[in-house]
Image (cartoon, coloured by chain):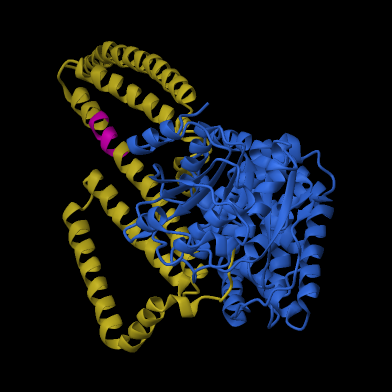
Chain colours: A yellow, B blue
Amino acid sequence: MTLKQLVSEASHRLLDAFLGVIPALLVLAASLLIGILIGFLVRAFLLLIFRLLNLGTEKGRASQMLRAAGITAAPSRVAAAVSFWAAVCTALAIGVNALTPGVLKDILGEAVGFLPRLFASALLLVLGLGLAAFARRSVLLAAVNAGFPWARAAARFTYAIVVSVFAAASLDQLGVGRTIVVVAFSILGGGLTLALALAFGIGGQDLARRYLEKRLRAEEEDSGIRHI
Amino acid sequence: MPALPPLDEATAARLKRIGSADILVGIPSFNNERTIGHVVRAVVAGLARNFPDAKAVLVNSDGGSTDRTREIVERTEVGNLAEILVDAIPSPTARIVTPYSGLPGKGSALRTVFRIAAELEVSACCVVDSDLRSITPEWLALLLRPVTQHDYGFVAPLYARDRYDGTITNTIVYPLTRALYGKRIRQPIGGDFGFSGRLAAKFLEYEGWDGPVARYGIDIFMTTTALAEGLPVCQSFLGAKLHDPKDPGADLQPMMVQVVSTLFELMERYQALWSEVEESEPTRVFGFPYAVGLEPVPVKLERLVSIFKQGAAELPAIWGAFLSEDCRRGIQEAARGERPQMTDETWVRVVFEAAAGWRRRSLAPETLILSLVPLYLGKVATFVSETRELSADGSEARWETLADTYERMKPELVSLWRRAERGMP
């Protein structure tokens, strides 16, 4: 067999392989189109329901939380977008499932199978950032209004704790360094609690006593003003 | 028409037996066994002296007291009315002691009072707090007669108060209500009010009883509703208001949130009305004003200053969501010296921009109002520093100057509010 024949045969096999993929691509394109169509319908339906029930507007608490996490859209729009992409992913998964067994199906199957976890992980992270921002703000306001001296530190500490918890949960969803995350988080959390307990209980026992006494005699700490 | 608050079976049966009444006096209560006996005696004596021919009902709307409050209301005897009132002809006053439903708070308690007033089709009502030590029988005449004899729809109390007593009223509620609705009512959240039966029915039409109106927001809700509905409004001088030592639940933060969020919520409801009002007018005052020896309020200025300065250092990021750069600069300048010097203009701008921020939903309502607490304390600290050497009249004049500033700057509020409605900063 000459080199020319070898090249020609290889080219034919390559062409056959590419042509063999076309039906699979068509199936995927069709499922994507169906997914997009269903996604649009689901999104429109959800927006209608939200509007009819007057839910998920810019006035609600969910909106504040999303804004704190850096998302400015109304919660109803976020929920509709999430539903849209969920429909698209589901349709794609069905499309991949319909492919004939082979390497392509395996690769695409794994990629599509990873999407829900990626999705859940991103949602956890967004939720965590929102909650953490909320918690930081609440702690800061409560501490400042009560005249607590380490207001900013307390707020930052709260933020870090909430973000850490949600980041660990998010990484766990992705299956990234699952054991390392759990162990690191346990050590960090346990160590921190012990350190705080020791610091506050032994190192700062006078401070702790004074603080608790002050809180218990809040009336004396009041500004004296009668507000209404 | 929203659903009416439910009445328990015993109360409903009692109302059926009573049928109708001319006058109703409502007393909201929760664990007030120390003072409610005195309040009941004053009410019964006041009704006997001032309305001997009227069919009167006393309603105690109780929030589940675990002490003897309800028992005291039912059993308290007035004593010898002939001695107490000299020439009165005692008439029996029906007493209804009823629990209320809904969120625990004064607002929910009064909602049940309004319902009973509507059921009995009374022509005049008044409500008085259950922790009062200074109430006298004359209060009943002063709160009810303007309604029964002069056709007023709403009677607000006017008390003699220490200059540092009622600072949320003085810095926010009085001047803002005056600028918005054009009537000078000095104690819009005084707590003891007289009103017509028709207005009681109007209160029941409100749909937000699951919000701040169910708690401390009720007082400003009643006053604002009366003003916005265009009813004739007056004030009655009641002397000093002495009550039980501070309610431990009456902390500044929830109080501020409930009162201010009700104010802002009602601004949204009545925006078409208040945006057209350009100036205020005095309201008629009934009663004989006299000098009262008041218990001085011991202010801890250092504490006020410390919280204001800490707020100025820690909260600019939160304020950035609803306060303009100019306004924040004014705050920082006020916080610079040893003593805060928050000008009236800066404070009024803070309140106006907070109202617009609330309308725009720049922050969660509670967060926005809580972030105002250090600023409010800064304004109070400024006032305390300015008035320590002044007489009571001088201090009162200072509050009036602040109220004038609110009125003068009101066009800014109208403009800010309109921009906020369009979602603009």
In the rendered image, the quadrant that contains the C terminus of chain A is bottom right
Q: How many marks?
A: 0
Magenta residues, start to end: A112-118
Point out residue B351 in the picture as x, y percentages from the top left corner.
68, 56
| Left or right of B111 on screen, residue B75 | left
Residue at image point 27% right, 10% down: A23
Q: Is residue B301 visible?
A: yes
Point out residue A43 in the picture as x, y percentages from the top left corner.
42, 21
Choose top left, top right, bottom left or bottom right for residue B100.
top left
| Left or right of B77 on screen, residue B142 | right
Q: Is residue B267 visible?
A: no
Compared with B421, A127 (above or below) is: below
Point out residue B220 in the picture as x, y percentages from the top left corner.
62, 49
Residue at image point 56% right, 76% down: A224
Looking at the picture, tell me which residue is in the foreground, B82 or A218: B82
The magenta stretch spans residue A113: yes
Compared with B224, B71 (above or below) is: below
Residue at image point 75% right, 69% down: B290
Looking at the picture, tell me which residue is in the foreground, A99 or B346: B346
In the rendered image, the quadrant that contains the N terminus of chain A is top left
| Left or right of A132 on screen, residue B157 | right
Which secondary structure dominates the residues rendered in magenta?
helix
Residue at image point 53% right, 57% down: B129
The magenta stretch spans residue B129: no
Looking at the picture, tell me which residue is in the foreground, A122 or B121: B121
Compared with B330, A34 (above or below) is: above
Point out residue B183 in the picture as x, y percentages from the top left corner.
77, 48
